[in-house]
Image (cartoon, helix red, strand yellow):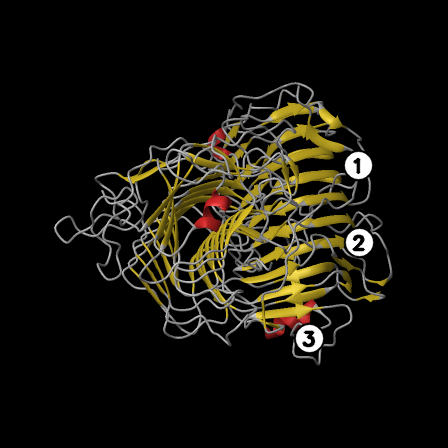
Amino acid sequence: MNKLSSFASDFRFNARICGGVALLLSACGGSTSSNGGNPTAAPQFAAVTYNGTVAPLDLVVSPSGADTNAGTQAAPFRTIARAAQAATPGTTIRVLPGTYPGGFRTTASGTAEARIRYVSEVKWGAKIVPPANSATAVGWDNRGSYVEIDGFEVDGSTVQAGTRWLTGLYTAGSFSTVRNNHVHHIARTVPCAASGGGIGSDSYYKGSANDVSANVVHDVGPAGCANYLGIYVNTAGSRVDNNLVYAVSDAGIRLWHDATNVVVVNNTVFNAATGIVVSGDGGYNGSVPNDNTRVSNNILYDNARYGVQEVGSTGLNNRYSNNLVFGNGTPFMLNNGLQPVGTVAAEPQFINYVRAGGGDYRPASTSPANAAALPADAPATDLDGKPRTAETGFDIGAYQHAGSTPTPTPTPTPTPEPPIPATTYNFFVTPNGSDTAAGTKSAPFKTIARASRAALPGTTIHVAEGTYPGGFKTTVSGTAAGRIYYVSSTKWGAKIVPPASSSNDTAWDNRGNYTDIIGFHIDGTTSQAGTKWTHGIYNGGSYDMIRGNWVHHIAKNVPCTSAGGSAIGVDSYYRGIKSDVVGNLVHDIGPVGCRFVQGIYVSTSGTVKNNVVYRVAEGGIHLWHDANNVIITNNTVTASHTGIIVGGGDYYHTTGPNNDTIVANNIVYDNAMGISEQGQTGTRNRYTNNLVFQNPTYNFSLKNGLTHSGTVSADPQFVSYTRTGTPDLHLRPTSPAIGKGTPTNAPPVDFDNRPRNATMGYDMGAYQH
């Protein structure tokens, strides 16, 4: 059985960084460290393809390519620099594993809604090393803005002829991100007279607002030299978080020049001269002091001179909160009478501390860093991509502790579903029934699969409250005049869970046509022996409806592979068309950071309406393969990687593109990315009256010159919003989503079956106020 073949969609994040290539001044530089210098397991970032060809706006680089090629998957470029020359806003440059000579410059810029992304297909698999004869002092010199550099290894350990590297990754544009990279052995054997660092974000070329996130930087600068830094940031409005930095000859993290209003949170720095330096003076673009900078939730341990130090011109509004500072020469040296608050002065209790590197720098279960962080400043995930939650407590440092992280299970109150039409035939299923019984109310079946085999067109299968082992297939079809209904007699009362020994990766695999699946609870929380579930409800038929179900904790503890998965999948592989996904609650789907697992996945025509979706590893709602002519209206999608993806490619039975799709009246809030077109899409897709807000990489990324209309860019004002607990995504009376929807294609009722009408006004999202 071919389930929905997932594709790895955009891996885009906002970012800011700093460094100095034009003038590498002393006290500018950077370095971070890894767990023993070995890459951790990472998701595969597979290229988006259609008919075997890389989708438009994607370029591929391979060690076996040629810069005279077209940059496609079949004919890749040889160098990152050549791919950058071909890049336009929205391009993803996918770099295959292998070794690449460094010392190059990239200058292409993206835009706020169409960033340029350089992505190592395997984390740390694309390795940048000094060329045989180096002519530049920088491993990778980026001058573009709205750029992301994600997942590379920059290894300066092999010294070759020519100019030696002083800086690993340098970015001089604005609104860029350096994320998930491993930068090490930079400037280890150079004279101390020069200066540089591991990762630098620089303002010399007027850059600002860059991010340096979740990098491992280590072994930077010659021993005892005060001119080399792990991570250096000269740009205002930047963020430095979740980095592991060690074995640096001067400061692990330094802010300087034009740096002000910078956030430095949840980093771990050890074995440097000083952990973090916050400094002003020497501005390239002005003379303002470094002010309104926050340094919180960091572990600063075993550094020779200071844990945290202010130098030069600094302001009165810098804040130093909830840092673990211990074993340094002097804990704090601050200006202007400032005092730190919430400091933890104790051994961090790493799992395995090795000063030179190669240890395990996650906190042990007894670490005083555990649950001692300032929650307001904590990133949503740690260096490993593990969630930081109120349930486990927010830890200080780059890593959350290794204890179990229970994911809260919501207990929402189900609302009654609209009545099911009377049918000619009725069968009954109860947990204490028997599959040798007649299936009547007095002699019910025990399993849904057995009831399905007895069904004819015009049948309702009534499933009583109770727990049922999943992993079954239903194949019987109804007709247009005689549908087959599977109905939980009490909404969410019939609960389908993994069997004691699973032999199927799908909870419920339906292949029948003209079929409704209504009101079931699919709960993958408790994995048992055998095959783990990667799919909740999979539908391969036509003219079907998946309505009012609660599907959660699917594929949470499985490896991240291109086999993918989804909570609810509506597939065209078996030539299914025109099916509907309406009024379902979907959450906690896929392992964190995995781009292959989706919430609601549609690869055919149909509708997706009134669904509530949150905490999905990739797309909350994702269209791909043969998807076209889909109506996506009045859904609420939050806390996922991408809110809504509209795309076509890897076609089963059509030639694409995804066209005539309507995306309207949705709330897409607090995802890494908002609404995105990917792969092959047409010119007739429409995006109207959506509330799209606080999706930091972009709110919209559309193709073919398409624009969105009627968009609301404001906080939706949910009744009670949380990323980690059980949110209440109903609208407050003051919500800007009220009355801003379009009546065209709006469902007649909302998720709670409350009417939508012109008198009340048509609200955005799954809930009417």
Dot 2 corresponds to which residue? 156
Closer to the eye: label 2 or 1? 1
Hey, which quadrant is residue 732 in on the image? top left
Q: Position of residue 363 (x, y in %)?
A: 67, 27
Q: Residue furthest left?
A: 759
Are the residues at dot 3 and dot 1 in contact (C-beta closer than 8 Å)?
A: no
Q: Is residue 618 above or below residue 733?
A: below
Packing grade of label 2 (10 A; few <14, some 14-19, many >=20) is many
- Amino acid type indicated by mark 3: Ala
**Relative to 562, 686 lies left or right:** left
Q: In terms of depth relative to the viewer, which is nearer, 203 or 240?
A: 240
Total numbered circles: 3
Is 606 on the left-hand or right-hand side of 398? left
Mark 1 closeness class: few <14, some 14–19, many ≥20 residues within 10 Å: many
3 vs 2, front mark: 3
Q: Secondary structure at mark 3?
A: loop
Where residue 136 appears, as percent x and y from the top left, is 75, 64
Q: Could you tell which of marks 2 and 1 lies nearer the N-terminus?
A: 2
* Residue 746 in picture, x, y percent from top left: 26, 57
**Residue 244 image point, x, y percent:** 68, 39
Q: Which residue is tagged 3? A: 74
Q: Is residue 34 visible?
A: yes
Placement of 20 over or under 407, stated as above or below: below
Quadrant of the frame with the N terminus: bottom right
Q: Residues within 10 Å of mark 3 (few under 14, many from 20)?
A: few
Residue that label 1 marks: 357
Residue mark closest to the camera, 3 vs 1:
3
